[in-house]
Amino acid sequence: MAEYVAPAAVRIVANEAKEFASPYLRYFFRYGQIVEDFKNQRMALKLTKQRVDTDVDEAKRQTEIIYDDVKNWLRSAEQELEETQNLQDEIDRVKCFKWCPKWGWRYSLSKKLAKKTPIISKLFETSNFAQVGYRRPLQGIEFITSADFMDSESSQSAFNQIMEAINAKGVNMIGLHGMPGVGKTTLAKEVGKHAREQKLFDKVVMFTMSQNPNIRTIQDKVAEMFGLNFHTNTEEGRAEELFRSMQRVNKILVIVDDLWEEFKMERIGIPFGDEHEGCKILLTTRRQQVCTKMNCKEIQLDILSEDEAWVLFRDKTGLEDDCSTLNDVAKEVAAQCKGLPLAIVVVAKALKGESLNGWRDANQRFKDSTHLYDEEVLGGVIEPLKLSYDYLKKGINQMTGNHIQMCFLLCSLFPEDKEISIEILIMCGIGVGLFPNVYSIEDKRKKIIEALKKLQKSGLLLETDGADTIRIHDVIRDFAHWLTSTGENRFMVKDKLKEWPHMDESYTAIALWNCSSIIKNFPDKVEFSKLKTLFLEGEWKRNRDDNFLVVFGTFFEEMKALQVLLLKCVSFSLKGFPSLPNLKTLCCVDCELENFSSSLTNMRSLEILALIGTKIDEISEELVKLSALKYFCLSGVGVEKEMNIPPNLVSRLTSLQELYVETKNNLNLLELKSLSRLTALSLELSTNQIPQEDFVLPKLQRYDIVGGYYSSDREAFRRLNIQNFSSSISAFNNLFCNVEELSLRNVGGQKNIVPSIDEMGVNELTSLHLESCNDMEFLIDTKKDQGSTVAFSNLVELNIESMVSLKGLCYGVSPSRFLQNLKQVSIERCEELQVIFQMDKLSEKVKCQAPLLSNLTILKLYSLPKLERIWEVKQSHRAIASLQSLKVVRIDYCDNLKTIFSPCLALSMLHLEELYIRYCDRLEQVIGFGQEDEIIENDSPLCCLPKLRILRIQICPNLKYVCANTWTQGLQSLESVYIRGCSQLIQVFNMEQNKHGQDIVLPELGSQKLVLHNVENSSQLCNTDVPVLNEGCIVVGNHKEVFQVQGGYSFSSIEKLELRNLFEVQVIWNDFAQVVTLENLTTLRLSGCKKLRYIFSPMMAHSLSHLKVLSIIGCEEIERLILAKDQVSSSSSNGDTSLQPMSFPNLTEIVVINCKNLNSLFPFGFIYVLSKLETLIVRGNSKLEQVFELEDEVEVVAEEEMKFDKLKWLTLQELPGLIHFFPKGYHSVFPAMTQLKVRDCPKLTTGFIIDSEDFVHCKTKLVEQDAVEESTSVRDAIFNENIYWSRRRR
């Protein structure tokens, strides 16, 4: 029997042993597979993180807010890559024992890798983010600047009254009224700017109403500010959505500018009054009765006093403050402006630089025009504006002056408060016959732009953010309408028409904007025999399939004098379209045209034809009949994907001077050869439309040719954008010599730009973008031309991406003026690039010119795995290179880079403000000695980085020094230092006194933050032997003490301080022998400082009156946050601190997690001074016995009540040793408590009680056996139980 039992037992034992031992055997015998799996997963995670990083960077460039889960994922991925770098290093070390492996070492490593691989794999699997960010609600461009604010007695008084009303209870609408041009809008913007800067409101939004408000446009603007996307399309539905969205924001300031009549804010969707007491409305209006009707708190903005008006006038004219005759006359002129800031500015600009006679003439004009006064419409602003208008003719011939005036009047035809397209103005100006003595469209364009600039300088037009638009002030627009209300040029402008207005035939220009598609009494025919200009716009609708304003051809029959016809959002058929013999300009924007080609014969004088976003049936041969056509634009035209243009049609438009085909088309580029007058060309081409032979257009001055996807940018003219082209690009040979912006994407067959593409050196080029041109090795090859070529002399911006063969910028001796104007450089993913700027191969001409790279301001390098040096400078060439303009440097994933700046270049970096370095695995020095022969003489004062504001270095495991062997003298501007994952860091700054005995200081550090994370071997941030440090200097390191100071010292500028993973730190600040204060510190975060013993001494605690956030995580050795009195040595006394009450009056958040040796949190006396505490989270502190410790045993006779009036969130979790929250005999009430968590606190003797009003009470039993007193008001009393409670909604 035994012989049968034994084998079975052996098998069972063997199987169990095998099952038990198999994972351990696996660590031995599958080591290679485990290593391979680990390396594959880690590399996949690294590449995925690079992709997510790129997506996040792009989202940030688009000002998006990054999702929290994406940020958490990036942190986790970064942490895993950082932690597993050590394992990667171990793998490499194990390779060294290939022939005699250390089996114990391999087993241990294999086990670690097997545990890490699934974690990495899980991270990799959770990386598919559909989006990494979302659009942040806009802050409002109106409040970025208020440079025009005139701080007068009147404006200051009105400003103070507005602020007082804003802060007053019961006032929800404030009305600011005053004369036109008095500065209401400017003051309102100043109020908005002040409210935002002082954080008086959660949101500040401003919009303009005007005489005919567009409710939908206003709703869109407000919704954008609140990050709201509408789900309904009706005006009422959108108003309700906006109403509900705004109700969710506590405090809002809405500024409604230029209100003309009583208006219900509910139409827009703005809640106020009883619907939203936190929403305040400030409106501006010319009419006081509007304020009265809307029950506003009325505030009047008066004109400037005589003295204030003179100060503003003198400032704008540039006159000296003296007693000259000129000033006497100028004061009289200033007085005629009636104290109106707008009038003062306009007149001052018109007369600036005039002679005494000119001033006298202007003064007499004022005196002779007293009849020009209409208080109801424009008040006293007409006279000064008329003077400025008349002065447009000053100093130039009569005809030119008339044309500049007409240009101004044309601007008044456009809608109020809208930006005006300069291109459309040019088309209209040419159509009405401006500058008839100038023949070419190009020259007329220059003249009109020159006129617009003169109007801007005179104050009659305003600049906008874009170079392609201008704007006219509403008061000045009203003045223009006053000018054209009578006389030879009669204009009429109407907006938001629902019914056809009464008009007589005397008008020369009519503009009807936003006409309803169901307009009443729209005539089939009108008689306007004098009409030269007609602007007609239908109601704009989001859905293009909605009804357009329908106009029949007969409508234009009696407009024989018509020269300019601008149509927007109009549908009409050209069938039966009458003959318009004088029509010069036809511009259709977002229209629908039927029978387009069939009626072109009726427009034989047409010179400008622009179809923008307009549906047409076809382009036919009939177009040839427009023999006078000089300007032809097709942009976004057609019902099909491609606009079919009949072959050889364009070649027969021989008068054509400007051609814009900005839509997919079948045009043959060679057809353009016959257009001998062509001066401007914008064209979208596919690859098969580009011919092999070159084409010549001798008069071409501006061009924008895109071979591939088109993106319109009229500012960048003389642009070539060629994509996906593998054969010769010789077709463009005649354009390369003067191209300004060149973009080549996936273009093959070119080894360089110069001489392969252009032998002359592309010296007009200002912007160069190269991407995926796999054959290109250098920008320029000078091997055959030793330094005689001038090349890239005007290049300002250089962007290079994914160039797999690129080896450098220049092969051979650098040519003359090479990159002398370069300002921005961005190079990404170039696998073979080893050196970027080689300054060791220079011709004698180059050595004599201005320093190389002296204009470079921005440098960005990303994923250049073989890059060894950014710049290569010989010692003898040090003087010919300078980084004197460099402001921003970003370097990511350059694994082979060891040094970034040499000392000689660092000396020139006087304007560097931001330095970002990430994931440079072999980087050892930021500023250091790249070459052994590079020596700085002892008597050379080395002063680096005086304007550096931000230093941010992450995951550079071999970085030892930021500034090696150099003194960083100054650093006066340093605000933020963030260093993370630099495990070998020894020193950041060398802060020794210089040889002249001058101290080195960091006065601004801390105004934002100081963060050190995972700098395990760092001995210090700054080394210093200075006995008495100046304001703001920080000495931080990974030794026993973080802040080392000698003598009395105040770190008063620091606001945020974060220290992470400083494993050797025992003391943050040792102030036993001196007073150290951090009076402006608001945030202190400590994490992973495993040997830290305490945070504050009593002396230090006294200075933390502004501390708001205190977070301590994973500080395992810490026993107390604040030293007890008996632990403070007598040497620390600077007065008896025990007599001074400790205070944290602004502390709102306390987080203490995983501090295993922490015994108590705060002395009991702190309860009285934590008056603003809102959040208290205590978790995983295994030895914690008391949250608030009674230091001196006091017998409590009767129960004492304590209050935490602001405490909302309380968490006590995983605290096995916790006995008391409060000492025995004390009772507390938490009236604001919204959430309470108590879990895994088995020894807790403090009970939490929720009464009938949902108030939380807390008390500790006097005797352990005591029961909680029964009370009718007590709903729940809990001891020693897990609690998760949140306040019920009321």
Image: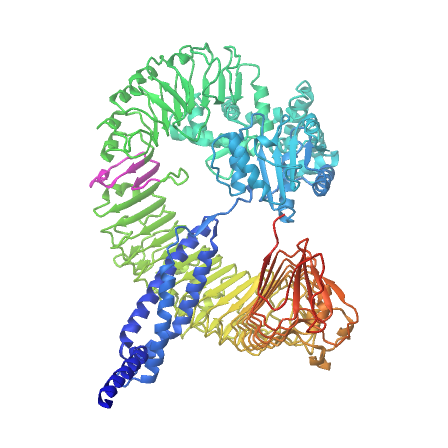
Is residue 1022 located in the magenta-colored stretch of the structure?
no
Q: Residue furthest front?
A: 1
The x, y position of residue 541, in whole percent, is 44, 28
Residue 949 position by quadrant: bottom right
Q: Residue furthest bottom?
A: 2
Residue 1256 position by quadrant: bottom right
Please indicate whether residue 834 sits to the left or right of residue 382 in the image.
left
Is residue 696 located in the magenta-colored stretch of the structure?
yes
Please provide the residue range marked out in magenta: 683-710
The correct choice, above or below, for 298 with respect to 1039 in the image is above
The x, y position of residue 433, in whole percent, is 43, 21
368 or 1284: nearer the eye? 1284
256 or 244: nearer the eye? 244
The x, y position of residue 478, in whole percent, is 59, 24
388 or 1030: nearer the eye? 1030
Q: How is the image coloured?
A: rainbow
936 or 528: nearer the eye? 528
User: Can residue 297 be seen in the rendering of this structure?
Assistant: yes
Please indicate whether residue 1100 sits to the left or right of residue 393 in the image.
right
Residue 11 position by quadrant: bottom left
The correct choice, above or below, for 677 with respect to 226 in the image is above
The correct choice, above or below, for 148 with respect to 781 in the image is above
**Which quadrant is the N terminus positioned in?**
bottom left
Total numbered badges shown on the rendered structure: 0
User: Can residue 974 be seen in the rendering of this structure?
Assistant: no
The x, y position of residue 879, in whole percent, is 44, 64
